[in-house]
Image (cartoon, helix red, strand yellow):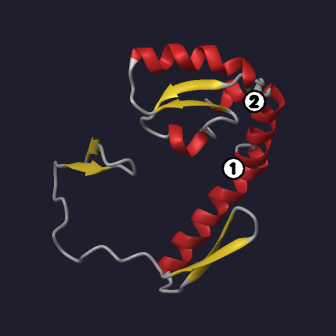
Amino acid sequence: MAEAMACGTPVIAFRRGSVDEVVVDGVTGIVCRSCTGEEMVQAVRQVEKLERAACRHHVEENFSSAVMAERYEAVYRRVVAGARGEAVGVLFGEGVRLRMPPPSRPRQGGGLGKGKAEPTAWGGEGRAQ
């Protein structure tokens, strides 16, 4: 979606996954909330009203490599602060700073043991140990 909008192409999508986080409904695309074919057809008819420049601007402001790098750094800072038991402020959007407590620590013991798959960051299972 971000790649399409970076080229100035509005996105039409069903409301699933990260759509609500990426597409600004009525500005950078149309989010089809009822997830029906009829709604998608109506969206195609309406998409010409959206400004292509708004799509590009949204991506530059929210998904550029510089913005994404800053957001990743903020996550890394939070992880490091959490490992130290510190609270950390995280910057969101227009200078809004949210003070967050350190993340909870995993319980001691109860490990995965030999031969079992280790959970990955996205909740799936990784390679066996």
Dot 2: within a 10 Å radius of its alpha carbon, few (fewer than 14), some, or many (20 or more) residues?
many
What mark, if any, has residue 68 been given in the picture?
1
Residue 57 picture location, percent across and down: 81, 39
Do the residues bearing badges 1 and 2 touch, measured as CB atoms within 8 Å?
no
Determine which residue is flagged by label 2. 6
What residue is drawn where x is 79% and y is 28%? 51
**Separation of marks 1 and 2 at Cα, in angstroms:** 14 Å
Dot 1: within a 10 Å radius of its alpha carbon, few (fewer than 14), some, or many (20 or more) residues?
few
Q: Indicate the quadrant containing the N terminus: top left, top right, bottom left or bottom right.
A: top right
Q: How many marks?
A: 2
What residue is drawn where x is 70% and y is 72%? 96
Which image quadrant is residue 113 in?
A: bottom left
Above or below: residue 35 compared with residue 74? above
Which image quadrant is residue 87 in?
A: bottom right
Q: Which residue occupies the foreground of this view, 58 or 124? A: 58
Q: Secondary structure at mark 1?
A: helix
What mark, if any, has residue 43 been given in the picture?
none
- Residue 9 shown left or right of residue 114 in the figure: right
Q: Which residue occupies the foreground of this view, 47 or 101? A: 47
Q: Secondary structure at mark 2?
A: helix
- Residue 32 shown left or right of residue 107 in the figure: right
What residue is drawn where x is 47% and y is 80%? 102
Which image quadrant is residue 126 in?
A: top left
Residue 24 picture location, percent across and down: 63, 40
Tag 1: amino acid: Met
What residue is drawn where x is 77% and y is 25%? 8
- Residue 60 shown left or right of residue 42 in the figure: right
Tag 2: amino acid: Ala
Residue 73 picture location, percent across and down: 66, 62
**Which of pointers 1 and 2 lies earlier in the amino acid sequence?**
2
Above or below: residue 13 compared with residue 76? above
